[in-house]
Image (cartoon, rainbow, N blue to C red):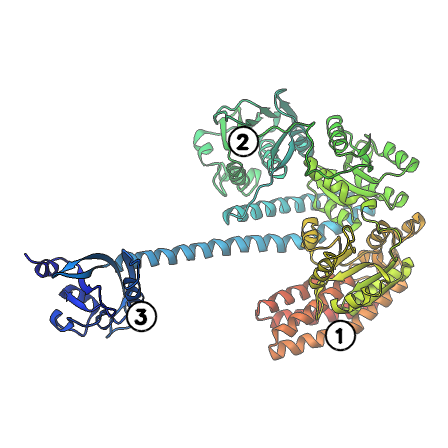
């Protein structure tokens, strides 16, 4: 059989072309390839001595021809094939290239295989994977958005419940408030679980690697759960072996979440006896590593226990022991699934051993490394010369706080009670106070409020095991740092450093005048009145360009700036300032405070990364503004003024409407009722054109103008403490930026604004 007969007999398309001709003239082609290409050449003979591109008119074949004429011809090539009579029908072929002699001529032999079926399967698989990814992302986004949207109003619910409780209501009302707070707390726990599950489902969960004080972690978690023991004959016990290191490397927040979830679960299913958290340096499941160690945690209870069948399905999402368990004990069934995923993210293993009627032991093992408590690190902040008051009643916790801060150079005084702390603060000043919430003779929050009156310059940190959204809301309003136990040395040291006033005061000789870049007229008016009341000199500009020109005069020592402004925004402004400082002497730094309604910007790592020195969240209370100005040396320390601001405006609150957060408004205006009403009237007058602009932009379909007007209304409304209107405007801004239809939302904004106007008239 000669070459031609062989090429015709194989079930592949074959084409032989000359190597020494730029057109790659065809020496041979078989019927199989002509059929595959639906070629106009009906017989192989008709295609002979034609250029390859004439037989195969695909644009991709030109690329192959160029490569074959080059110095390094490819060995194989994949390309689509379009039939001339049906250009919409695409097939895929793989061409394997062989260099050989054909009838004594140098030639390329092209072996053509139809791979359309496998290519279509590949494309179908890609589409299915893309659809699955899109579905997973949609689900994760939905869960995250839902959790966020429910959490936002829940913060207001918590805040109002807290305000009611502070009014010392009758016992019947207090009982209802406590019940409502407990229910709200349960809902927030579910939201946290849903949000964590969504993150892990979308592979967006990332772990931190900090120092974890093991004993403080376990005992603090049990302290946080002690409230669930009331009414039950249960002992909460920690059993930590002596060879367990005091400090290890891990994610303290997530490790605490696992222990909290497993221990809380044990308490739920235990009526009497004990729940014990064992920690051992002796793993039973995972092999001992060559370096580092494996910690084994066991949460043992004397509860109802479970059968092996139930244990086998426990760690699946939304799984409960049985339907009756779900009805009797409640829960979503997400907690154990989240624990399993977190442990696996840590590189560990988790499981359960249980006997019905006897109890259960939930265990997990994780790899980690020991950290010497004497070790110092270049990454730890320097606290040299900083004096700290630690108020902590747990002896082990108090020792660890003192030891951690002293290792960074701080001078620390520790006391266990509210009374002793107050005496120390009266006696002498401290730079920072690190205060626990649960003290033997009072609440840390009340102590913080008293310290603010006595020492407004003192930085304050709430360091607590309590997961209380209401407490966090109150601390945020006071401008106090909230820090969850246990924090690493780095976390605790950074919080102390950030709260120290001497690290944020202006350099000696700097001007004390304040410059504020803010384009919203209502916000300018509110802050202007606040500053006038405080006696602080300030000037206003409406964008970044004007701010840069004003700063060139050298009249200002600090800048407050909004983020979203016409022309040059806050980001561009701070970038220009930081770039200009690069050519100046080392250490020359102009302080810039970001003024924003974006809660994310309040996180230190966010605003520092953008070049800002501090963040002030809108709406700005008079107390927050005053403390910030004192820290930066723009305002003298006068405790009596702080006490004046603490007065409660009952008269105005009685006549307020739910559309306006009266308590927040009066805090902004320093309890001055007349000024508050004047400011609200000014807000409605100045914002009426904005609402008209929103309607005009909506009617004309101008999304850009609609987003800008909604942004301006959002800032003005939140500064005027019209939070419902501000939230609607924020949603409208977001939808407009996404070019979503917003007709119904615009109508809601108009109705909310009209209601605010009526409420202001009533005042």
Q: Looking at the image, which is closer to me, 306 or 205?
A: 205
- Residue 170 picture quarter: top right
Q: Nearer the viewer, mark 2 or mark 1?
A: 2
Residue 529 drawn at (x, y percent): 87, 63
Which quadrant is home to the C terminus?
bottom right
Label 2, on which residue? Answer: 366
Disc 3 to disc 1, how far (Cα)? 62 Å
Mark closest to the chain's N terminus, 3 or 1:
3
Residue 521 drawn at (x, y percent): 79, 69
Disc 3 to disc 2, how far (Cα)? 57 Å
* Badge number at residue 688: 1
Disc 2 is placed on an element classified as strand
Q: Nearer the viewer, mark 3 or mark 1?
A: 3
Disc 2 to disc 1, how far (Cα)? 60 Å
Residue 551 drawn at (x, y percent): 81, 64
**Can residue 486 be seen by looking at this rendering?**
no
Mark closest to the chain's N terminus, 3 or 2:
3
292 relative position to 57: left or right: right
Q: Are marks 2 and 1 in contact (CB under 8 Å)?
A: no
Disc 3 is placed on an element classified as helix
- Residue 213 picture quarter: top right
Disc 1 is placed on an element classified as helix
Label 3, on which residue? Answer: 59
Q: Residues within 10 Å of mark 2 (few under 14, many from 20)?
A: many
327 w.r.t. 540: above or below: above
Q: Residues within 10 Å of mark 3 (few under 14, many from 20)?
A: few
Q: Name the residue furthest left.
A: 1
Q: Name the residue furthest top.
A: 242
């Amino acid at each position: 059989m000669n070459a031609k007969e062989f090429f015709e007999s194989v079930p592949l398309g074959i084409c032989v072309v000359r190597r020494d001709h730029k057109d790659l003239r065809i020496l041979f082609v078989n019927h199989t390839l002509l059929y595959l290409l639906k070629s106009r050449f009906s017989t192989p003979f008709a295609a002979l001595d034609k250029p390859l591109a004439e037989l195969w008119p695909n644009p991709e074949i030109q690329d192959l021809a160029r490569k074959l004429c080059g110095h390094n011809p490819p060995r194989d090539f994949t390309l689509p094939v379009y039939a001339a009579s049906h250009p919409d029908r695409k097939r895929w072929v793989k061409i394997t290239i062989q260099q050989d002699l054909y009838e004594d001529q140098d030639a390329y032999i092209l072996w053509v295989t139809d791979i359309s079926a496998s290519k279509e399967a590949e494309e179908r698989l890609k589409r299915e994977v893309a659809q699955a990814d899109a579905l997973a992302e949609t689900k994760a986004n939905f869960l995250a958005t839902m959790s966020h949207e429910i959490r936002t109003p829940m913060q207001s619910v918590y805040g109002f419940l807290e305000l009611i409780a502070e009014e010392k209501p009758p016992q019947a009302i207090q009982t209802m408030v406590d019940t409502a707070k407990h229910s709200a707390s349960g809902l927030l726990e579910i939201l946290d679980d849903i949000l964590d599950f969504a993150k892990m489902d979308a592979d967006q969960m990332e772990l931190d690697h900090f120092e974890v004080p093991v004993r403080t972690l376990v005992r603090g978690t049990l302290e946080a759960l002690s409230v669930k023991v009331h009414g039950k004959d249960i002992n909460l016990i920690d059993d930590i072996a002596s060879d367990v290191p005091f400090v290890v490397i891990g994610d303290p927040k997530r490790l605490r979440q696992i222990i909290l979830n497993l221990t809380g679960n044990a308490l739920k299913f235990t009526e009497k006896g004990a729940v014990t958290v064992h920690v051992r340096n002796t793993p039973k499941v995972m092999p001992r590593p060559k370096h580092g160690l494996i910690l084994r945690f066991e949460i043992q209870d004397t509860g109802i226990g479970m059968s092996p069948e139930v244990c086998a399905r426990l760690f699946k999402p939304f799984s409960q022991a049985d339907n009756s368990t779900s009805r009797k004990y409640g829960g979503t069934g997400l907690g154990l699934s989240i624990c399993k995923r977190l442990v696996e993210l840590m590189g560990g293993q988790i499981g359960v051993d249980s006997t019905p009627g006897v109890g259960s032991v939930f265990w997990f093992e994780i790899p980690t490394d020991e950290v010497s408590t004497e070790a110092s690190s270049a990454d730890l902040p320097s606290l040299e010369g900083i004096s700290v008051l630690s108020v902590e009643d747990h002896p082990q916790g108090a020792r660890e706080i003192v030891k951690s801060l002293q290792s960074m150079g701080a001078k620390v005084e520790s006391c266990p009670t509210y009374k002793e702390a107050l005496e120390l603060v009266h006696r002498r000043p401290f730079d920072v106070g690190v205060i626990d919430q649960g003290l033997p003779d009072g609440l840390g929050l009340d102590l913080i409020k008293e310290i603010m009156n006595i020492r407004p310059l003192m930085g304050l940190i709430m360091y607590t095991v309590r997961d209380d959204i209401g407490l966090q809301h109150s601390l945020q309003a006071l401008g106090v740092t909230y820090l969850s136990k246990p924090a690493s040395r780095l976390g605790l040291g950074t919080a102390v450093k950030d709260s120290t006033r001497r690290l944020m005061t202006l350099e000696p000789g700097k001007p004390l005048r304040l410059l504020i870049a803010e384009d919203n007229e209502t916000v300018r008016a509110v802050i202007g009145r606040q500053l006038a009341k405080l006696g602080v000199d300030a000037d206003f500009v409406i964008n970044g360009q004007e701010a840069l020109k004003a700063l060139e005069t050298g009249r200002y020592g600090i800048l407050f700036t909004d983020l979203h402004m016409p022309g040059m925004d806050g980001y561009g402004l701070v970038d220009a300032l930081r770039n200009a400082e690069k050519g100046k002497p080392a250490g020359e730094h102009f302080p810039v405070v970001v003024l924003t309604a974006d809660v994310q910007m309040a996180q230190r790592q966010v605003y520092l990364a953008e070049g800002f020195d501090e963040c002030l969240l809108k709406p700005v209370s008079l107390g927050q503004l005053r403390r910030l100005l004192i820290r930066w040396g723009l305002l003298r320390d006068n405790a009596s003024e702080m006490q004046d601001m603490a007065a409660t405006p009952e008269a105005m609150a009685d006549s307020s409407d739910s559309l306006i957060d009266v308590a927040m408004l009066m805090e902004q205006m320093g309890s001055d009722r007349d000024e508050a009403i004047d400011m609200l009237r000014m807000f409605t007058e100045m914002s009426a054109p904005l609402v008209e602009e929103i309607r005009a932009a909506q009617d004309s379909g101008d999304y850009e103008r609609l987003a800008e007007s909604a942004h301006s209304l959002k800032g003005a409304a939140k500064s005027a403490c019209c939070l419902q209107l501000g939230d609607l405007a924020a949603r409208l801004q977001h939808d407009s930026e996404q070019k979503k239809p917003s007709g119904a939302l615009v109508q809601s904004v108009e109705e909310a604004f009209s209601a605010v106007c009526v409420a202001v008239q009533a005042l």
